[in-house]
Amino acid sequence: MRASSYSSPSSPFLACSGFSMIEVLIAMLVIGTGALAMVMLQLHALRSSNESGLHAKATLLAQELAELRAGYALHDGGNGGNDPTLFAIQAGKAPVVADDCTLAPCSAQGFAAAAVTDWGNRFLRDFPSARAVACHDGSSSAHTRWRCDHDASAAVVLKLGWRRIGTTRPDSGPVMSLVLGQ
């Protein structure tokens, strides 16, 4: 005689019959939420890394401009000419073309103008919606606004700004502001 395949309700096989559909859906929801959080964290890390890279590059460009300004001040000889290291550039506006000092000798002012033009072109190329101002500014809010007071006795301030990653328009004030000297 054959044994019956029917198990009684107290059988261990019926008590452990698998996962219900609700349990599977809840598990998928928990795993999906965790995966989405990891993707968002990775996106934030990439944005932060890119923004840090822009800040580092801007700092190097500011240092280069400070050295150019210090060298120009030493070689200017106090001739009272226009200082080419004081400028304003903005994305979307045509850059000023300076003399090419590689083909013919230049004065200190011509060399500084060519170097500042090259500096400005690199800044505009490397930064989204870039804007830079180098001016005399002695006001207490010099580092938070674009406007300058042009007081010749005040320090020269370099103000740099660009559109930050994840935003649609540039910041209203400079992202970075550094004193270049007198």
Image (tube, rainbow, N blue to C red):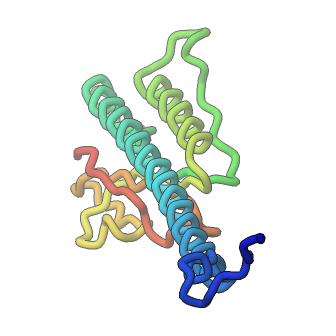
28 versus 48 height, above or below = below
176 versus 149 height, above or below = above
Give the residue at x 62% y 75%: 18
* Quadrant position of residue 78: top left
Residue 5 horizontal side relative to residue 135, left or right: right
Residue 132 coordinates in the image, percent (x, y)? 48, 52
29 versus 81 height, above or below = below
Give the residue at x 49% y 26%: 110
* Quadrant position of residue 85: top left
53 versus 144 height, above or below = above
How many numbered marks does the figure carry? 0
Give the residue at x 27% y 32%: 70
Residue 83 seen in render: no
Give the residue at x 25% y 64%: 138
* Quadrant position of residue 95: top right
118 and 105: which one is in front? 118
Q: Quadrant of the N terminus?
A: bottom right
Residue 175 coordinates in the image, percent (x, y)? 41, 61
71 and 104: which one is in front? 71
Residue that lies at the very extreme toward the right in this rendered image: 1
Residue that lies at the very extreme toward the front in this rendered image: 1
Residue 38 coordinates in the image, percent (x, y)? 51, 61
Residue 113 coordinates in the image, percent (x, y)? 50, 32
Residue 95 horizontal side relative to residue 50, left or right: right
141 and 56: which one is in front? 56
Residue 17 seen in render: yes
